[in-house]
Image: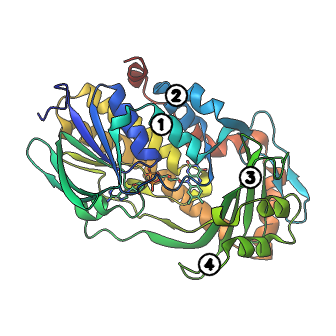
Amino acid sequence: MISGRNGTRSAVVIGAGIGGLTAAVALHRIGWDVTVLERSPVITEVGAGLTLWPNAIRTLGVLGLEATVSAHAIPTVSRGNIRQPDGRWLRHGRPDDVGVLAIHRAQLHEVLRGALPQRSVRTGADVVEVTDHEHGATTAYIASGEPHELTADLVVAADGLNSASRQRLFPDHPAPVFQHRTVWRGVTEPDAAWPVQECITLGRGEQVGLLPLTDHRVYWFLTVNAERPGLRSDDEHAEARRRIAHWHEPIPSVVDATRPERVLHNDIVDLDPLPAFVRRHTALLGDAAHAMTPDLGQGACQAIEDAVVLADHLAGEAAVPAALAAYDRHRRARTQLIARTARQSNARNADDSAVAHALTALAVRLVPPGLWRRSTARWADWTPPTAISAIGSR
Ligand SMILES: Cc1cc2nc3c(=O)[nH]c(=O)nc-3n(C[C@H](O)[C@H](O)[C@H](O)COP(=O)(O)OP(=O)(O)OC[C@H]3O[C@@H](n4cnc5c(N)ncnc54)[C@H](O)[C@@H]3O)c2cc1C
């Protein structure tokens, strides 16, 4: 066994996204010595909002972070309020709809980072190679132009959608798949468009979401169909404004109230199911393992679940490969089912025929509340195994 600084077991986490940081916190909680290597000089992808579903909120609770995260979030009812582009209401949220937290990504990152010792996260550290040995793995990385190496009992590869770790472990696995959709996202400046009621507006093959955040900001997204990946405009803010110019208020006002340089534009891609999430001393986690379309709002939530389940198996099993095999058994079926459901939901949302739009509007009006709630229960009702609750108290 390779020892950390205090004779404890050690891990290198590749990537300081939500998945990597949560994994680092969970491992730190079970007493491991953790180093997070993040390629960016500053942590990226923090410029928009996120919904955290009850499964993720409970899991953050296991790490003792639920109250801190909630303090930075606005409780809301996801997919409760549904409108049409002309403003007509299809459905009003009900108290028994599934409650979620809307949070600015930067704030979630801050909470997770704050739960780690300062020295744990090295930014500007680009991992270029991981070599597995009989008793651990060595990670080679470049920082400030210099090569470095770290040897640890475990490598957690949380290096995101285009994970090089995944490519190293599964070189024949297909690259992420473009799902013929593209999405603009932004967050308004404080008080620039406020107050705003949370809603999702369903157009023909197009959807807009508005979610109030703390500090009187609003997170918005606009999802549309796209023939090819990589179609970009010189001014993404102007392009998003043009596309929703005739949609109901406050959508145009909210998009207007966003600083142009803060508008993000991403194509929607996901990953075909991997044959395994682990190999010996390396575990894939989060988007690296199971990138999914954002239709269910579960990508980061699943990364959070992964992190705590991984730590739980490592806490209960001395041999890393055995613990990772258990993690793989525990996580792969669930996350791949959710990714498949998200892909199907993406395909339904992409249908821009008048018939599909009318049928969706009818279904939204007629589906009974119990069925509405149950449609999300498969992922939202998940609870971390009770054994894990010991983690928070260590
Ligand atoms: C439009 C949209 C809306 C979404 N909404 C939601 C939502 O409401 N709720 C939800 O749960 N999920 C949502 N998601 C999904 C969510 O954003 C992702 O699932 C989640 O951020 C994945 O986190 P991660 O840590 O696995 O990967 P990432 O956030 O991609 O982090 C990977 C990190 O690894 C670093 N890295 C990569 N390669 C290296 C290397 N070689 N060396 C060092 N560092 C490296 C990267 O710089 C990055 O910081 C949404 C996604 C999209 C696109």
Horizontal and vertical percent position of residue 359? 79, 65
Q: Residue at x 25, y 68 (%)?
A: 171
For discs 3 and 4, the disc positioned in front in the rendered view: 3
Marker disc for residue 189: 3
Horizontal and vertical percent position of residue 263? 65, 64
SS label for mark 1: helix
Q: CA distance from mark 1 to mark 4?
A: 35 Å
Q: CA distance from mark 3 to mark 1?
A: 24 Å
Marker disc for residue 369: none
As displayed, is residue 99 above or below residue 87?
above
**Amino acid type at image mark 4:** Ala
Say which residue label 2 marks.
Answer: 65
For discs 2 and 1, the disc positioned in front in the rendered view: 1
Say which residue label 4 marks.
Answer: 226
Of the two numbered discs 2 and 1 on the same chain, state the one appearing first in sequence: 2
**Amino acid type at image mark 1:** Leu
Q: Are marks 2 and 1 in contact (CB under 8 Å)?
A: yes
Say which residue label 1 marks.
Answer: 112
Of the two numbered discs 4 and 2 on the same chain, state the one appearing first in sequence: 2
